[in-house]
Amino acid sequence: MGIRFIIAGMLVGVAGVQAFVKPSVGPEPALPLHLSEYHIFEGRPSDLKPAAGYDVYDLATTLFTDYAEKQRLIRLPPGGHLQRAGDGLPVFPEGTMLVKTFYYYNDKRDTNRGKRLIETRVMLLSNGQWIWGTYLWNADGTEAHLMNTSSKIKIDWRDEHGGDRTIQYAVPSHADCAKCHNTAAKFMPLGPTIRNLRLGPAFEPSLPAWQDSSYTLRQRVGAYLEVNCAHCHNPEGFCAKSGLDLRWGASLTDQRALRKMIKFIGKGRMPLIGTTIVHQEGVSLMEEYLKNLSNK
């Protein structure tokens, strides 16, 4: 199985199956109340085994969400394929479905000890517009229910260093999702851009993995900001009025702006939505870059 993708006339992979669309209720299709109605997973839902037609995809650099693990799936309609249009978002065929599940391993040192499913976000391209929903998993990991309001869930887990961690994980509301996914007043996907998609050896992303020290410090910081900040900090984003453009390729030489940004992130004031704790590794990376910039 794979993703059908056209790159300069070359076809890569094979297609998925027909996307799920419920009958319209009002101006847009109504989403199912239960995640199981999509038939996304085979067997036990907690195993996160994709059903036929759902393909896993990865990103070079990922968004930080309180150290949550994420599984990303895409389903294309019959004969559908992604079309490359520059290095931003691909052109998705009508009926495309994107699925992202957030979870924590009980003990990251030993994944066989199971996982705690938190939420699954679904995006469906219908009539040329993306509709979306967030499904909150029950404690048993057997079903997830559609929700519109925000909520906080206490999560306990053991990290890769053996440390016991506890957070109040924040599930965003329907309206919260619209703020970050706002591009030119339209709801759009964020992460799966051409420059960030991993589609196997036939197509490698141009965006570096920010943790990869084989890249320059400037490249790593640029990738981190592109994925974690630029969806709001761009001329058409939610924080356009700030005047701060943090998209890949933007200039990162304004030391005053960088210091201010690092200060806000370090105090937990940024990002506005999606995190409850500070990503210390990300802050350290930006501090190192600023120090290096100041010494030049």
Image (tube, rainbow, N blue to C red):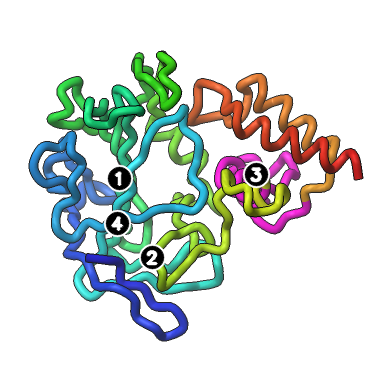
Residue 48 vs 152, above or below: the answer is below
- C-alpha span from label 2 to label 1: 24 Å
Which element is circle 2 on? loop
Q: Which residue is mark 1?
A: 122
Label located before the other in sequence (1 or 4): 4
Q: Which residue is mark 4?
A: 74
Q: Front-most of 231 and 100?
A: 100
Q: Amino acid at mark 2?
A: Gly
Q: Front-most of 60 and 265?
A: 60
- Left or right of 193 in this view: 255: right
The stretch in magenta equals 222-251
- The disc at residue 200 is 2
Label located before the other in sequence (3 or 1): 1
Label located before the other in sequence (4 or 3): 4
Q: Quadrant of the N terminus?
A: bottom left
| Category of crowding for the residue at label 4, using alpha-carbon neighbours closer than 10 angstroms: few (below 14), some (14–19), many (at least 20) | many
Label located before the other in sequence (2 or 1): 1
- C-alpha span from label 2 to label 4: 15 Å
Percent position (x, y) of residue 159? 41, 23
Q: Is residue 250 magenta?
A: yes
Q: Are marks 4 and 3 in contact (CB under 8 Å)?
A: no
Q: Is residue 6 magenta?
A: no
Which element is circle 3 on? loop
| Category of crowding for the residue at label 1, using alpha-carbon neighbours closer than 10 angstroms: few (below 14), some (14–19), many (at least 20) | many
Label located before the other in sequence (2 or 3): 2
